[in-house]
Image (cartoon, rainbow, N blue to C red):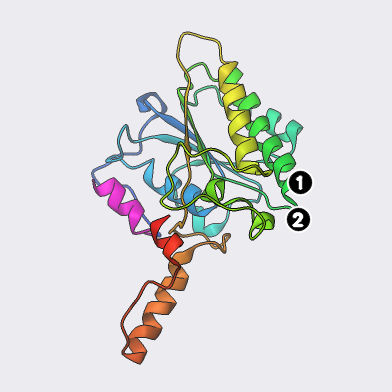
Amino acid sequence: MSWWWAGAIGAAKKKFEENERPPQPQDYQHVGLVIGVTGIVGNSLAEILPRQDTPGGPWKVYGVARRPRPDWNADHPIEYIQCDVSDQDDTQAKLTKLTDVTHIFYVTWASRPTEAENCEVNGAMLRNVLRSVIPNAPNLRHVCLQTGAKHYLGPSESFGKVRPHDTPFSEDLPRLNVPNFYYTQEDILFEEVEKRKGPLPLTWSVHRPHLIFGFSPYSLMNVGGTLCVYAAICKHEGVRLLFPGSKDCWEG
């Protein structure tokens, strides 16, 4: 389980050990396409998947992000692709060529002022990726979509207006009766996977984390740094380290 532990502690740097050679293209049984590779989850996947001790590893990894590759991400053994997946033409031009992909990890999103706009832009981004890759990657086996706890709580603009589900949450809870780009993404995922024709079945999974820990200078949503500061203050003041969140946050 060293692969899991390495990811769980959010190590900033991991390299192949001296007795491990960088795998050749013909050695790869799994080829991951990480959409949003500079985010908290994407950066962690870029660290973990290429390792020898990762299940099915080492993986070949394509990492996609809108901006040029940052220096802090440059030591990960991945093929970095600068691509704006909100641009259909850019996505088609760059992702249709990735015919060896076996797994898609979709871990990105875009924020807009209203939830209607969020639904439109985030739905288009996911659709652009799936329509570029699924028809052109005959060995594609699985699509992993990450959303989050707002699936159960509702979008920010609905807070205080719509009653969220009671905790603890379970995967089979019905959707809330409000616009939510997570719902839009799920519907697009189901629709595009259903279109798949070929000998290999294409499966999917949706992951709905609440709090995420990890490393990325491009994300302000990493609660890890905040908890570290809080713990340091508690130590300095000589007080007990108590969970600073709500009951719903603890149980959710």
User: SS class of the residue under badge 2?
Assistant: loop
Give the residue pinned by disc 1.
117
Answer whether residue 251 is visible to the viewer in this image. yes
Give the quadrant of residue 130.
top right
Magenta segment: does it hold 10?
Answer: yes
Spot occupied by residue 24 in the image (x, y as percentages of width and height): 38, 30
Expressed as whole percent of the image width and height from the top left, the position of residue 160 reads 64, 60
Residue segment shown in magenta: 1-11
Q: Residue drawn at (51%, 16%), measured in percent from left and top?
A: 138
In the figure, 174 relative to 118: above or below? above
Q: Is residue 81 above or below residue 191?
A: below
Depth order, front residue of 105/123 = 123
Q: Magenta region's main secondary structure?
A: helix
**Residue 113, numbered label:** 2
| Percent coordinates x, y for residue 89 in the rendering | 75, 31
The residue at the point 76 percent across, 46 percent down is: 117
Q: Nearer the viewer, residue 147 or 156?
A: 156
Q: Tell me the quarter of the image containing the N terminus.
A: top left
> If the image is split into quadrants, where does the C terminus sit?
bottom left
